[in-house]
Image: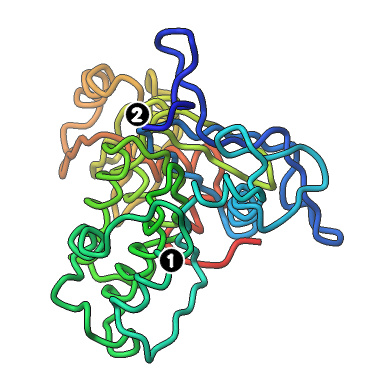
Amino acid sequence: MHPAVRSNLPGHPTPLAALHSVSKRFGAHLALDGFSLELLAGQITALLGPNGAGKSTAVRVLLGLTRPDSGHAEVLGRNPRSSEARTSLGAMLQVARAPDTLSVREHIELFRSYYPRPLPTAELLMRTGLSALEHQRFGTLSGGQKQRVLLALALSGDPAVVCLDEPTVGLDPQSRRQLWNEIRALATAGKAVLLTTHYLEEADALAHQVVLLERGRTVRSGTPAEIKHSVAAARIRCRTQIDPTALRALPTVTAVEADRGGVILFAHDPQRVLRELLPLDDSLSELEVSAASLEDAILALAPTAASAGSVPGVCP
């Protein structure tokens, strides 16, 4: 683990990378507006938001690919454009290309040559599940296999900070789950991982910390559980004859939505709601109670973010 991982105060981790009050404008569009972010060792931070929220701009500033108009970024206490910082960064960007004619091994060995202390080729092949494909040309690989190659390239230099911009777009469920396991392993190894994704299930499953970005500013941050609990602890679905206005007046209910001939109630205290709801309608049916999802919470906090949640896209 890098010596900059922790401060001198016990229990107070030092960020491996950070953005400090960063603003960036592209013409009339303000992509980031005083945005700050800290990435801690051993943690996966999910940066969420709708198209145009500023997620990719934040990643590019952190990687030193885009200069901010104000504020600054740092990686291991250094400017991300410095050679020391660059060799401590690994990135898997949403829009990435690799020559089709090179083999998997050739790609990895080429990228390893850029770093002073790269991981062994065999280890990279094993960790990303590519050992059996090392001599296969990149252009002949499936979409999921290509994503694993791009991850191997991002890890070639054994980086302390790993930025993954929409890493599972277009993958089938099995390939996505395999990639999730590798992302979790990065955090277990002490890396600071920044994940941007439109798949809110992915953020809920992986992230230790979630930052919700909209119009270049932080709307809310916290653990997935904290964000979900801040809006509603549970969702209650049922078919009922009770008027929606009366449902909204039930204790701890925060929202009511129509759903396939029934309704969904979002509530902080579902047991209390049920105690009052059941005597009001003896014809109530199809009752289901479940924990609120991250998508439910984000829909309440930033509706445009949740409505874009399952639609992959490029964010300026």
Q: Quadrant of the C terminus?
A: bottom right
Image quarter for residue 144? Answer: bottom left
Crowding at dot 2, Cα within 10 Å, few <14 / some 14-19 / many 20+, comes out as: some
Separation of residues labelled 1 and 2 (CA atoms): 42 Å
Image quarter for residue 232? Answer: top left
Q: Please state which of residues 74 and 279 is positioned toward the viewer in this rendering.
A: 74
Residue at the image position 22 percent from the left and 51 percent from the top: 181
Q: Is residue 47 left or right of residue 185?
A: right
x, y (%) of residue 314? 57, 67
- Seen as rendered, the residue at the extreme top is 9
Residue at the image position 50 percent from the left and 38 percent from the top: 300
- Seen as rendered, the residue at the extreme right is 28
Crowding at dot 1, Cα within 10 Å, few <14 / some 14-19 / many 20+, comes out as: few
Reading the image, the residue beneath label 1 is 113
Residue 27, relative to residue 270: is it above or below?
below
Going from N to C along the chain, the mark reached first, 1 or 2, is 1
x, y (%) of residue 268? 35, 22
Residue 176, relative to residue 276: is it above or below?
below
Q: Amino acid at mark 2?
A: Ala
Reading the image, the residue beneath label 2 is 225
Q: Is residue 74 left or right of residue 112?
A: right
Residue at the image position 36 percent from the left and 39 percent from the top: 207
Residue at the image position 52 percent from the left and 72 percent from the top: 95
x, y (%) of residue 200? 38, 50
